Amino acid sequence: MLDAGPLEVVSGDLDHRPELPILLDLLAEAEEQAGAPVLQRWVRRAGPAGRPIDLLLARDFGGFEDALATLAERGFVLRGGG
C-alpha cells in the first residue's frame, strides 16, 4: 500500500476515523492506475487546488478527492516542477 508519511495508517486509527477507509479506497484505486511512486510525488506537489497533502492536513477530504479526480482526468501524469 501507499507509504506517504501522513497518509500512512497507524494500527487502530480506522476505529475512530470514519474518513480513513474512504481515503484508503480512493488511494488504492489511484495506486492501481498510477503506481505508488507517482502518488508519493503527487501528494506533495502543487496542483490546481494546492498541495494534496495540505488538503489532508486541513481535513478537506472533499478537496482531496477532487484533486485525485483531477489527477485521474489528466491521465495520472505529473507536469512541471515543484
Image (cartoon, rainbow, N blue to C red):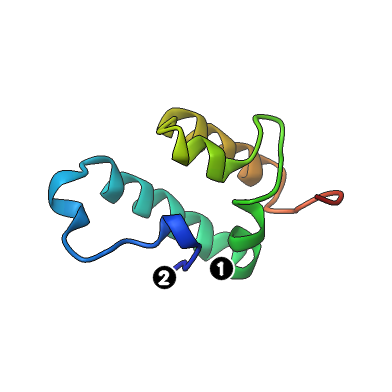
- Return the residue at label 2: 1
Q: Quick check: 82 left or right of 16? A: right
Specify the label residue 36 is tagged with.
Answer: 1
Above or below 50: residue 17: below
Name the residue at 21% across, 44% down: 17
Specify the label residue 61 is tagged with.
Answer: none
Q: Quick check: 46 left or right of 6? A: right
Q: Quick check: 30 left or right of 15? A: right
Disc 1 from disc 2: Cα separation: 8 Å
Name the residue at 54% across, 45% down: 53
Q: Amino acid at mark 2?
A: Met
- Give SS at disc 1: helix
Q: Quick check: 5 left or right of 51? A: left
Residue 68 makes an appearance in the image: no
Name the residue at 16% across, 60% down: 12
Above or below 66: residue 6: below
Q: Residue furthest right?
A: 80
Q: Could you classify mark 2 by the number of other residues whose Cα lies within 10 Å: few (under 14), some (14-19), or many (20 or more)?
A: few
x then y, percent, for residue 52: 57, 42
Tell me where residue 69 sits by quadrant: top right
x then y, percent, for residue 26: 42, 49
Decide which of 58, 65 is in the foreground and name it.
58
Cβ–Cβ under 8 Å for marks 1 and 2:
yes
Q: Could you classify mark 1 by the number of other residues whose Cα lies within 10 Å: few (under 14), some (14-19), or many (20 or more)?
A: some
Tell me where residue 34 sits by quadrant: bottom right
